[in-house]
Image: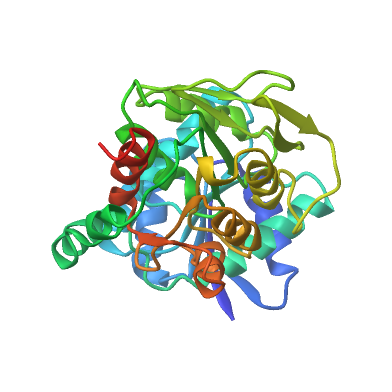
């Protein structure tokens, strides 16, 4: 039985979330809190398996409560936000930086209620919550020259595009990568991040605050440019067409996702082939894994995030199993690899 703690300053919202979670026979809500101070005390006393956390609360907000919980009693935290205002959504990603695993909108119908229940169940299985920065120094010491040695044996073609796919745990890893890419990065970057509807614009705004690159939601028909990052918007499959233009298609879900990493990677393989670099980051499922292998077969340089730094190693793990990834990398290794490849190995 999964023990859940519900944290929200609104009595109505608390009761809604409690009702939704208690409807599932595998979940039992063991406590509620109306602010961050109560949440910290409840975690110490009840030791829940998972927490749903509001952001804007009196006394102590969700950001500081998450930070203190992760420092004292690390517990899987799911942010549940009732606002889709991009500024408020961007705040949810600051909470992710503090250690929360993922963000969801407040349920408004049966579909979003099911998503909350499924997410709470999945996140509760992550018993030891480790943020990748805690293992960074160890991995740097373990194999400091492995990537350099393998890269030296490659003769990669000119890199004309970089494609990335991520799901659960992806935002903080994407921030790590994009923050380290130089402002004159000589290739466009296309990204599919699995995200609840209404969160994509806030994600872009949050990432743009610290990156030297231009980051935006992709628009149908626009031409991709160097030093620009294009995110697939909610509800659209994103493809790249011959000539380097973006196509956004309201299409059926693929691998249960829209946007889908598989859809993007397949188009990149067709248009760019050996002139692409592509990678799969932390996330549930297998979206993009087979297509990463297709990219590798066409001569592209491919990589997957390592297990130690992944919140969920589903997508990158499947890519590794299929031998789709030429490199298996910790987050801090990815931007240097991309920069070196995009600059012709220099």
Rendered image coloring scheme: rainbow
Residue visible at 71% across and 56% down? 115
Foreground residue among 32 and 172 = 172
The part of the image, by quadrant, that contains residue 22 is bottom right
Residue at the farthest bottom position: 1
On screen, residue 9 versus residue 60, left or right, reads: right
Q: Is residue 287 visible?
A: no
Foreground residue among 40 and 97 = 97
Q: Quadrant of the C terminus?
A: top left
On screen, residue 7 versus residue 121, left or right, reads: left
On screen, residue 80 versus residue 306, left or right, reads: right
Please provide percent x and percent y for residue 111: 81, 53
Total marks in image: 0
Please provide percent x and percent y for residue 227: 43, 22
Foreground residue among 139 and 185 = 185
Q: Quadrant of the N terminus?
A: bottom right
Please provide percent x and percent y for residue 92: 49, 38
Residue visible at 65% across and 63% down? 290
Residue visible at 59% across and 53% down? 298
Residue visible at 41% across and 45% down? 172
**Residue 324 versus residue 198 in the image, above or below:** below
Please provide percent x and percent y for residue 204: 52, 28
Q: Is residue 75 visible?
A: yes
């Amino acid at each position: 039985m999964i023990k859940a703690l519900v944290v929200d300053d609104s009595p109505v919202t608390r009761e809604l979330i409690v009702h939704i979670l208690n409807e599932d026979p595998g979940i039992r809500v063991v406590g509620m809190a109306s602010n961050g101070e109560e949440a910290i005390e409840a975690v110490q006393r009840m030791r829940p398996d998972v927490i749903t956390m509001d952001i804007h609360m009196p006394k102590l907000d969700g950001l500081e409560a998450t930070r203190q919980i992760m420092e004292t009693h690390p517990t899987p935290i799911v942010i549940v936000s009732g606002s889709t205002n991009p500024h408020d959504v961007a705040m949810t990603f600051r909470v992710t930086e503090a250690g929360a695993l993922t963000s969801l909108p407040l349920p408004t119908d049966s579909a979003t209620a099911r998503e909350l229940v499924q997410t709470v169940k999945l996140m509760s299985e992550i018993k030891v919550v480790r943020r990748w920065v805690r293992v960074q120094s160890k991995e740097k010491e373990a194999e400091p020259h492995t990537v350099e040695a393998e890269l030296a044996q490659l003769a990669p073609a000119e890199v004309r595009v970089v494609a990335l796919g991520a799901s659960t745990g992806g935002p903080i890893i994407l921030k790590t990568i994009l923050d380290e890419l130089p402002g004159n990065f000589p290739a466009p970057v296309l990204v599919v991040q699995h995200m609840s509807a209404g969160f994509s614009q806030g994600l872009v705004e949050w990432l743009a605050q610290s990156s030297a690159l231009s980051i935006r939601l992709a628009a149908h028909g626009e031409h991709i440019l160097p030093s620009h990052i294009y995110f697939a918007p909610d509800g659209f499959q994103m493809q790249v067409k011959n000539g380097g233009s973006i196509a956004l298609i309201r299409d059926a879900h693929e691998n249960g996702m829209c946007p889908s990493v598989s859809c993007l990677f397949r188009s990149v393989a067709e248009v760019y082939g050996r002139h692409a670099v592509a990678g799969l980051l932390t996330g549930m499922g297998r979206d993009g894994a087979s297509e990463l292998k297709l990219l590798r077969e066409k001569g592209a340089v491919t990589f997957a995030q390592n297990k130690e730094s992944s919140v969920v190693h589903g997508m990158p793990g499947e890519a590794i199993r299929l031998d789709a990834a030429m490199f298996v990398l910790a987050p801090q290794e990815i931007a240097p690899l991309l920069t070196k490849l995009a600059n012709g190995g220099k």
